[in-house]
Amino acid sequence: MIANHAEIYPKRVAVILYRPEQDADTLLADFTQDLARQGVRVGGIVQRNFKGANGMKTMLARDVARGREIPSCQPLGSGAISCKLDANGLADAAVVASRAIKLHVDLLVINKFSKQEASGRGLRDEFC
């Protein structure tokens, strides 16, 4: 973890700003696949949102280096009002990001789980 954020070299950090109706997750997934095909060592996770077989929105975190999909939503049912984020899936995603950091990949991709990071959890440690 970086103790002093002033140590971050700004030309090595990128952010995608988008509107809620735009599909930044697919853009990021396609971008990382294209780079990997060109021989760039890419690591980390991208998020994938879709409707499951039951018609409910669900979310996966995809390991960009290995292609493994990590379930990151709990099946709470249609009447649920609490957070669907699966803590185990989020922990698995953190392991994938940490592994990529240790391997010194050329590009580290970390999707956000904004409410979690804003409260000091989620993948916040991996961001820093």
Image (cartoon, helix red, strand yellow):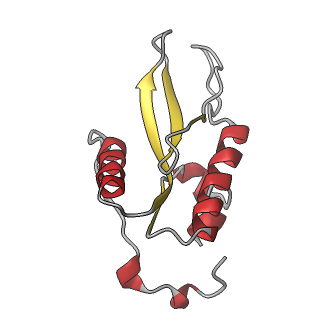
Which quadrant is home to the C terminus? bottom right
Viewport quadrant of the N terminus = bottom right
Measured from the top left, where is residue 37 in percent x and y? 32, 53
Residue 15 percent across, percent down from the top left: 36, 65
Q: Quadrant of residue 2?
A: bottom right
Q: Residue at x 50, y 9 (%)?
A: 54
**Measured along the vertical axis of the image, is residue 25 above or below residue 98?**
above
* 12 relative to 95, above or below: below
Seen in the picture, residue 7 relative to 104 is either above or below; the reply is below
Left/right placement of residue 51 relative to residue 86 reads: left
Question: From where the camera sits, is residue 122 visible?
Answer: no
Q: How many marks?
A: 0
Of 67 and 52, the residue lying toward us: 67
**Left or right of 49 on screen, residue 117:** right
Asked whether 56 or 41 is in front, the reply is 41
Left or right relative to 2: residue 69? left
Residue at 66% across / 66% down in the picture? 125
Residue displayed at 29% across by 52% down:
34
Q: Is residue 68 visible?
A: yes
Does residue 56 sit above or below 12 in this rendering?
A: above
Q: Looking at the image, which residue is at 37% across and 64% down? A: 40
Q: Could you say where residue 70 lies in the image, as x and y percent from the top left? A: 59, 36
Residue 88 percent across, percent down from the top left: 73, 39
